[in-house]
Amino acid sequence: GDEVILPAQTFLASGLSILMTGATPIFCDIEYLSGNICIKSLKEKITPKTKAIMPIHYGGLPADLDEINKIAKQNRLKVIEDAAHALGSTYKGKPIGSISDFTAFSFQAIKQVTAGDGGALCCKKISDYKRAKRLRWFGIDREASKVSILGERVFEVDELGFKYHMNDLAASLALGNLSNYSSRLKRVRSIANKYTESLKSVAGVKLLETKQDRESSYWLYTLLVNNRKNFIKKMLSKGIPVSVVHQGIDRFKIFNGKVESNINQRKFDQDQICIPIHSGLTNNDIDKVIGAVKEGW
């Protein structure tokens, strides 16, 4: 009967992780100009069954974490940040991963730092960190379980654990990726700034909001466009890949979502499209994208 509130503007995994605990995902609306959780809608969705809030930092732009954590404290709820897009993002000078009870990062193949797959969990409390370390490997406390004369670890298991630990090969790949991430992040932010300055006055385009008190990792650069199919056809005709990331997951039958209730989510589903952004883009690539958008569609 437990409920967890989250926005539907995310990948399927966010909602499935809630179902896997036996709880029910409750989808609140988003802010149209950010893709992030709507505070007003969040408040309206809280019930006596609510146990946690899962904000998604869409595209890398941090959600309104002060307001979310205040609501959580008032209602004795946990905050679990889905920061799959947000490695390197900051909120009021603090790195994402240092603010809420739990923060989950993704190292999936096309994220900013990759281990091939997998991710990382940040915990504010030492007790949560130690428990997570036990649960990730079958509930066994490896640090406290010494090997006996029989050649086997001596341990006790009193809680259902998993096999969620990362192997050393994957970790090595992630560490190698991490070594130059700060310079790549700087490059991506400079590309985003050029897009913002160049496209802010283009007819038929709305840019997502930026806020002075937070920095995005810009895993995505999303436009809200009129006549999206025509826009996509125009970009593809110029050899520029574009894509939707993602449409609201409340539409899936597995969640039994009430898709008609979240007005901004439906409008976002209709208008959003992502243009290329990554540190490998050349200045010519960037100018090509900007020129194609400015030509119209």
Image (tube, grey):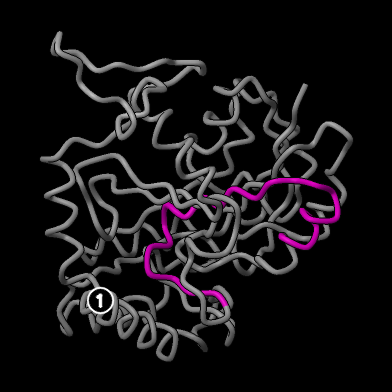
Q: Is residue 121 left or right of residue 125?
A: left
- Which residue is pictured at 52% across the width and 38% down the height? 14
Q: Quadrant of the C terminus?
A: bottom left
Q: Quadrant of the N terminus?
A: top right
The answer to whether residue 141 is magenta is no
Residue 157 in percent (x, y) is at 44, 16
Q: Is residue 120 above or below residue 279?
A: above
- Which residue is pictured at 64% across the width and 19% down the height? 22
Q: Return the residue nearer the eye: 150 or 26.
A: 150
Residue 2 in percent (x, y) is at 75, 27
Q: Magenta stretch?
A: 69-91
Residue 289 in percent (x, y) is at 28, 75
- Which residue is pictured at 45% across the width and 73% down the height? 216
Q: Secondary structure at mark 1?
A: helix
Q: How many marks?
A: 1
Q: Label 1 crowding class (10 Å Cα cut-off): few <14, some 14-19, many 20+?
A: few
Residue 136 in percent (x, y) is at 38, 30
Tag 1: amino acid = Ser
Q: Return the residue nearer the eye: 60 or 246.
A: 60
- Which residue is pictured at 61% across the width and 65% down the height? 63
- What residue sits right under mark 1 in the picture? 182
Q: Residue furthest front?
A: 149
Q: Residue furthest top?
A: 150
Q: Return the residue nearer the eye: 72 or 37.
A: 72
Say which quarter of the image contains residue 192: bottom left
